[in-house]
Image (cartoon, grey):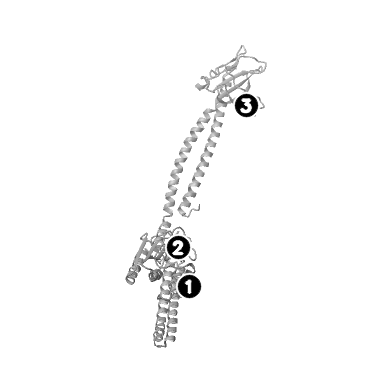
Amino acid sequence: MRIKSLTARVLLLTTIWSTVALVVIGLLISTLYRKSAERGFQDLLRAQLYNVINSVTIGDQGALSGSPQLGDLRFAQPKTGWYWVVEPLGTYTAPPLVSPSLGSVSIPVPSVLEAPFDKNYERYYQVTDASGNRIQVAETEVVLDTDGRAARFRVTGNVDVVEDDVRNFSHSLYLALAGFGVGSLIVNALAILYGLKPLDKARAALERIRAGESEQLKGEFPREILPLANEVNALIDSNRRIVERARMQVGNLAHSLKTPIAVLLNEARVLERSHGDLVRSQAEAMQGQVQSYLNRARIAAQRESVLARTDAEPAMERLVRVMRRLNVDKEFELTVAPPHIAVAMEQQDLEEVVGNLLENAARFASTKVRLSVAEAPGELKGAEGSGRRHWVELVVEDDGPGLEPDQIREALKRGKRLDESKPGTGLGLSIVTEISNEYQGRLELSRGEWQGLKARLILPGITKDVA
């Protein structure tokens, strides 16, 4: 799964790296300590071996004599794994000397091929004694007198001592590294959160702009982010100027065309009926076309602007209130959920599209019309597709006769009127379609639960997720 948060990415990478690094360091230190402990253990056995050698001699009767004092009580306690043994070699025969801890038990001795002597004529190997102790043996052979009489010397130590030492050290080491790691992760997290806090402030400022609560990125930003904030503010100012210029030009054009069209309509009244009706119908069609294209030009100039925002509930309440006054014989229902829902459209555009739908519904309804506004379910895409936006669903239903599928296709055509007995120019639904498409929304017509026409309008909503 892709992580979208920059803070989460940095924290995750830092946590993974710190964990891997501490584990590797712990294993490396533990391995080095084990090797050092084993080397120290072997050096201890070697020192004790030569202490035994220096303590043993051949007496006048040819017997081995001596009482090595190695300063370790374990050599006097049975079954400890700490022993020393002195055995005569060759034709020289004499009773061997053994430590009190060994007693009458013998130590297994591997062949020279299995454990050869080194250049100092010493060899070290591990065996298991009769008590089940795993012991390390240090062995050498020494000539004791001028007659060439020699003896084999062996000193052993319990390997569990090394294992216990390494185990205790590793336990303390891992606890220390774990504490250090947790502390480091906390410090790193605080440092990252503190370092990325300006980005979070910039994100919050963008959310306020998107929500219509602010018109610029406000706040103190570090020099790494300040140029970006300045450029965004400059872009917003430029966009605002473009929108205002487009509105002014559209207004000027509308004003310049309004008078000639009004003159044509007035002149049509004094002409003969056939010619007058023709001129009037064409002038009205021209008026609708001009207004439609002027709206499209204005919408295109400010589409995708972060400043376009209209709160749905008050706008819809005004429209429904007007429709109730104009259609006292019809019942109008309004539902807005959640109440704070907002649409990313200019208020006049939103009121025009919904007003057209309500006007059509009131024209054909028998007794009632319903308008509902809600967040669109799931991730939807508009006419041009934008998977990063939230969408608002506006539904207008009536209890009139409704339309068949082929009639729906005809109704969406510009200037097409299915019922000539009803007043209107036939431009309402096509205007709704054009305006919603310009905002990357869409209009869908179908039969509603009251068996009348159901108009479902999908429009872009306001979201705080600007990432």
Give how far apart the Cα atoms at labels 2 and 1 are.
46 Å
Residue type, label 2: Leu
Circle 3 SS class: strand
Q: Which mark is residue 413?
A: 1
Residue type, label 1: Lys
Q: Are marks 2 and 1 in contact (CB under 8 Å)?
A: no
Residue at 43% across, 54% down: 195
Q: Residues within 10 Å of mark 2 (few under 14, many from 20)?
A: some
Q: Quadrant of the C terminus?
A: bottom left
Count of all numbered marks drawn on residues in the image: 3
Q: Which residue is mark 3?
A: 122
Quadrant of the rendered image containing residue 284: bottom left
Give how far apart the Cα atoms at labels 3 and 2 are.
75 Å
Residue 217: in sight, yes or no?
no
- Determine the residue located farthest toward the top in the rendered image: 61
Q: Which mark is residue 228?
A: 2
Quadrant of the rendered image containing residue 302: bottom left
Give how far apart the Cα atoms at labels 3 and 1 are.
105 Å
Residue 83 screen position, x and y as percent? 55, 21
Circle 2 SS class: helix
Q: Which mark is residue 150?
A: none
Decide which of 118, 173 is in the foreground and name it.
173
* Closer to viewer: mark 2 or mark 1: 1
Residue type, label 3: Glu
Residue 293 screen position, x and y as percent? 45, 75
